């Protein structure tokens, strides 16, 4: 399609609307605009106002000058072809975002074409997830994923599914699982944990720098109750709190194989970390 014209930018939706989602959206936009170096993941999943109220214009404007955000996740947020056009323009200017999660929105092949045009100028993006959108012309998807694969990085969805098949199939050659920085959230997390439960060969699992929260750790704890092979688990730089760490402590009551868990970069009380580390240290001595 022709390159879209720059949109007329609007200010963030006023907080006076007293909608928690809108308030959170405005706060994130403000942090992106301020180029907050601690904000490397922008997760606005299920925020329907992105597509309904300001059309995401405040976010797109903020992203153009930000150089710290690496992951942009807008799953199930009513993103249309028009919003994809505006997002593509913002990504033409952005040089830090490498991963886009755009599942379950409302854009069509036209929106994907805007993204393809963007990739001609933007060489930073290497992972794009578009599952769950309107039927998109397979030829356009092939063109998009061809560009990404030419950058040396396989498509996230295809790569993850291949790994899951190997885990479910108990591939004896797969003893280390590296899923760092793949934008894994609840949907992917559930599939991964189900696969881990029945695997007998994996020893080390790295799920760092994703979007795993306490619910995800709860599912992991259930998987570890059945797994007897995993010894090392890295969950650094996720969205886990003390509640999630407590789930892991409970998992150690039934799992005597785990000897190392890395939770650095999460918001967990020092006392809970100390308790977990003490329990693991006893296993290593």
Image: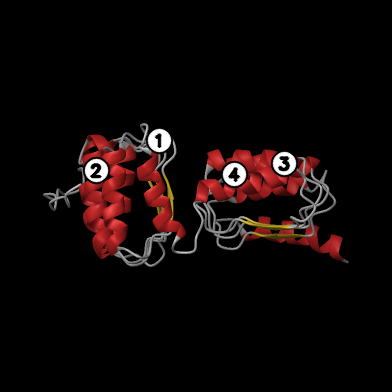
The percent coordinates of residue 78 (x first, y second) are: 31, 35
- Disc 4: which residue: 161
Residue 283 placement, left or right of 160: right
Q: CA distance from mark 1 to mark 2?
A: 14 Å
Which residue in the rendered view is the most extreme toward the right?
Answer: 285
Foreground: disc 3 or disc 1: 3
State the residue position of label 2.
83
Q: Is residue 165 above or below residue 28?
A: above
Quadrant of the rendered image containing residue 197? top right
Work out whether residue 242 can be spotted. yes
Whichever of labels 4 and 3 marks the residue nearer the N terminus, that label is 4
**SS at circle 2:** helix
In the rendered structure, the answer to whether residue 55 lies left or right of residue 145 reads left
Residue under label 1: 104
Q: Are marks 2 and 4 in contact (CB under 8 Å)?
A: no
- Judged by depth in the image, the label closer to the viewer, 1 or 4, is 4
> Is the residue under label 4 in contact with that under label 1 (CB below 8 Å)?
no
**Above or below 47: residue 280:** below
In primary-sequence order, the first of circles 2 and 4 is 2
Q: Is residue 107 above or below residue 90?
A: above
Q: Where residue 27 appears, x then y in whole percent? A: 31, 51
**Regarding mark 1 in the picture, which secondary structure is present there?**
loop
Calculate the distance from the C-alpha at mark 2 to the C-alpha at mark 3: 38 Å
- Residue 168: give its label: 3
Which residue is painted at 75% across and 45% down in the image? 224
Secondary structure beneath dot 3 equals: helix
* Marked residue nearer the N-terminal end (3 or 1): 1
Within 10 Å of the Cα at label 4, are there few (<14), some (14-19), or many (20+) other Cα atoms? some
């Amino acid at each position: 399609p022709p390159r879209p014209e720059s949109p007329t930018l609007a200010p963030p939706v006023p907080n006076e609307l007293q909608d928690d989602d809108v308030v959170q959206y405005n706060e994130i936009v403000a942090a992106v605009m301020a180029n907050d170096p601690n904000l490397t993941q922008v997760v606005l999943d299920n925020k329907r106002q992105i597509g309904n109220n300001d059309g995401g214009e405040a976010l797109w404007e903020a992203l153009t000058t930000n150089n710290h955000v690496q992951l942009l996740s807008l799953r199930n947020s009513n993103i249309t072809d028009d919003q994809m056009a505006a997002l593509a323009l913002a990504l033409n200017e952005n040089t830090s975002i490498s991963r886009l999660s755009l599942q379950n929105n409302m854009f069509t092949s036209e929106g994907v074409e805007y993204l393809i045009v963007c990739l001609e100028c933007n060489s930073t993006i290497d992972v794009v997830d578009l599952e769950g959108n309107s039927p998109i012309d397979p030829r356009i998807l092939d063109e998009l994923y061809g560009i990404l694969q030419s950058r040396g990085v396989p498509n996230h969805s295809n790569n993850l599914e291949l790994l899951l098949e190997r885990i479910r199939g108990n591939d004896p050659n797969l003893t280390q699982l590296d899923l760092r920085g793949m934008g894994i959230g609840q949907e992917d997390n559930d599939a991964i944990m189900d696969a881990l439960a029945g695997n007998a060969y994996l020893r080390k699992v790295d799920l760092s720098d994703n979007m795993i929260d306490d619910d995800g750790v709860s599912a992991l704890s259930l998987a570890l109750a059945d797994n007897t092979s995993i010894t090392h688990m890295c969950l650094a730089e996720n969205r886990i709190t003390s509640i999630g760490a407590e789930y892991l402590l409970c998992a150690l009551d039934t799992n005597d194989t785990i000897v190392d868990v890395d939770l650095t970069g999460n918001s967990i009380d020092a006392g809970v970390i100390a308790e977990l580390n003490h329990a693991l240290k006893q296993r290593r001595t």
